[in-house]
Image: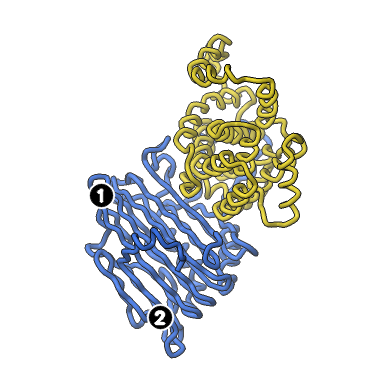
Chain colours: A yellow, B blue
Amino acid sequence: MSELFTKNCESDQAVPFTSEQTQNCLMDCDMEEMSADNVKTSPADHLQQWSQWQLLDSILPTGGFAHSSGLEAAVQARFVVGPEDLKFYIIQVLENTGSLLLPYVYCASKFPDVESWFKLDRLLEATLTNEVSRKASASQGSALLRVAASIYVEIPSLKQMRDTYLGSGAASFHHAPIFGLICGLLGFDSSTSQRAYMFITMRDVVSAATRLNLIGPLGASVLQHQIAHVAEQMTKKWMDRPVEEASQTSPLVDIVQGCHGYLFSRLFCS
Amino acid sequence: MSGKGGERGERKMETGIAAVEKVGGRSTVTRCFSKYPLKLIVPNKVGSSKTDAVWIYTLSYGGGIVSGDRISLSIGVGDGCTAAVTTQASTKVYKSVDSKCSEQVLEARIGRNALLAVIPDPVTCFSTARYSQKQVFRVFSDSNLVIVDWITSGRHESGEKWEFELYRSTNQIFLEEDQPLFLDSVLLEQASTCSIAERMQEYHVIAMVIILGPMLKHVQNQVQDEVKKMMSRHFRVPTPTAGHYMRSESQSGPTRPALVASCSAFGPQAIGVVVRIAAVTTESVYMFLRHHLATLEPFLGVIPYG
């Protein structure tokens, strides 16, 4: 077991939240929203929650687990050597995701229509100048749209959109705008959509860390929870920005990610 | 021009304008204007007389950019012409006064079958400096473009390391007026989750090289092959005992490469290549550029950074 894991188990005796604590926490954050929601909650809203949770479930076959966000290259080039490096690397991936991709999730979820999505997709194609990240984004986005169009049959526009653009070659189906669009159609508000994007990004890097054998499954979950408050800070910081402001904030991480294609042996696609 | 009226009229306070056109079959500077704080110099002879290229040097009064300065340069390279824009030394951005930001803007149009090489020395931001740079290039599918954009960590001989407040560098390339081909923006600011120095680790230089256009295909291919070869040596193949190496190698073991680079093709039919570099020393990046851009000599008359 890694040191990280052991250490955290010792220091976090109280870590398994009691349900009371969890509830208090939820109450604090969402007091106002919840009281407003209670008034208008309907059976349709309850059903929508099932759809929303399914979108964030790691069992959704979108191929996210084929990607390490450059972690594999970072390990092989010795940028990630110890547990502290791993945590730091994940935080930087999250920061870059926030500054570069959240604007796309935001705009797509705010205006979940095909024309807006297509413009965002074209812009992101020019913005993802790193080939490894660009291909990873296109393959995850395409897979997500395929899955969503098959499962959310109550939203026929997903299938129509896929049928229209798939053969044309005009769209790349980048992940962030597709994710934002689906969030918008499933009734997520735009701040939840953006937070959810950060969540799945973190989930996938942490999962990659376990499969690279950097950390055990329990240690990974502990780490994921530790990083959550940093991820929340970053979500807040980069939330609700126009795509014109999208920028790289961790150039070193970007360079290392770009090296993925140079690895002689590799487990992941990116 | 781009035809997006409004803001242009207001902001069109260029401090420099240069136009290069064919005169008597040779690339010639037909217009050159500059005013404080920018100075443009066009030496007659830079390379051999056999090459058809003009060189434009951008200089600043007092050798650097003062807090609050706004420099705006507009360059037009006519069909079939070749121009290089460069500096004589690194661009220093002095300490910020009253949190004012210094700004540098370049707008360039590159004609059909023309070549523009923007090959300056690096930007060096002093501690507390705030600097924002935006370069917009408008090209055709047969235009050719080389851009080198780079920054060092500051005056590290006096102990400064990534101590400026803000650095933003935006590079945009549009094809046929308004199709986005390459949109890139790097933002480094202290007010982040971790300081810039922490993010950069032991690296002191971040550089980007863009090579675009059909005339430069061989330059692109060569840099892609060589960077791949150079970097492949630096990756260790994981051992079967993986899972233990995180602890066992954290104390000793080989270190990270002193220069990390990766190449990416971009645009339709991979019309362009971008190379991103992080390096421990400025000199190693000069060497890298000298080596990989040497193939531009036949176009420019001399080896860039030579």
Badge number at residue B229: none
Whichever of labels 1 and 2 marks the residue nearer the N terminus, that label is: 2
Chain for numbered disc 1:
B
Q: Disc 1 versus disc 2: distance between alpha carbons?
A: 36 Å
Badge number at residue B95: 1
- Crowding at dot 1, Cα within 10 Å, few <14 / some 14-19 / many 20+, comes out as many
Badge number at residue B47: 2
Note whether A190 is above or below B181 in the view shown.
above
Quarter of image, res A186: top right
Residue situated in front as seen by the camera: A203 or B260 = A203
Residue situated in front as seen by the camera: A60 or A180 = A180
Which three-letter amino acid code belongs to the residue tagged 2? Answer: Gly
Note whether B253 is above or below A228 in the view shown.
below
Q: Position of residue A246 (x, y in %)?
A: 49, 47
Q: Is residue B298 visible?
A: no
Q: Secondary structure at mark 2?
A: loop
Quarter of image, res A184: top right
Q: Position of residue A238 (x, y in %)?
A: 47, 38
Which three-letter amino acid code belongs to the residue tagged 1? Answer: Lys
- Which residue occupies 38% across, 65% down? B120
B237 lies left or right of A94: right
Label 1 in the same subunit as label 2: yes
- Which residue occupies 69% across, 42% down? A267
Looking at the rendered image, the disc whose residue lies closer to the viewer, 1 or 2, is 1
Chain for numbered disc 2:
B
Q: Quadrant of the N terminus of chain B?
A: bottom left
Q: Position of residue A9 (x, y in %)?
A: 55, 17
Residue situated in front as seen by the camera: A28 or B115 = A28
A111 lies left or right of B103: right
Q: Position of residue A263 (x, y in %)?
A: 63, 49
- Crowding at dot 2, Cα within 10 Å, few <14 / some 14-19 / many 20+, comes out as some
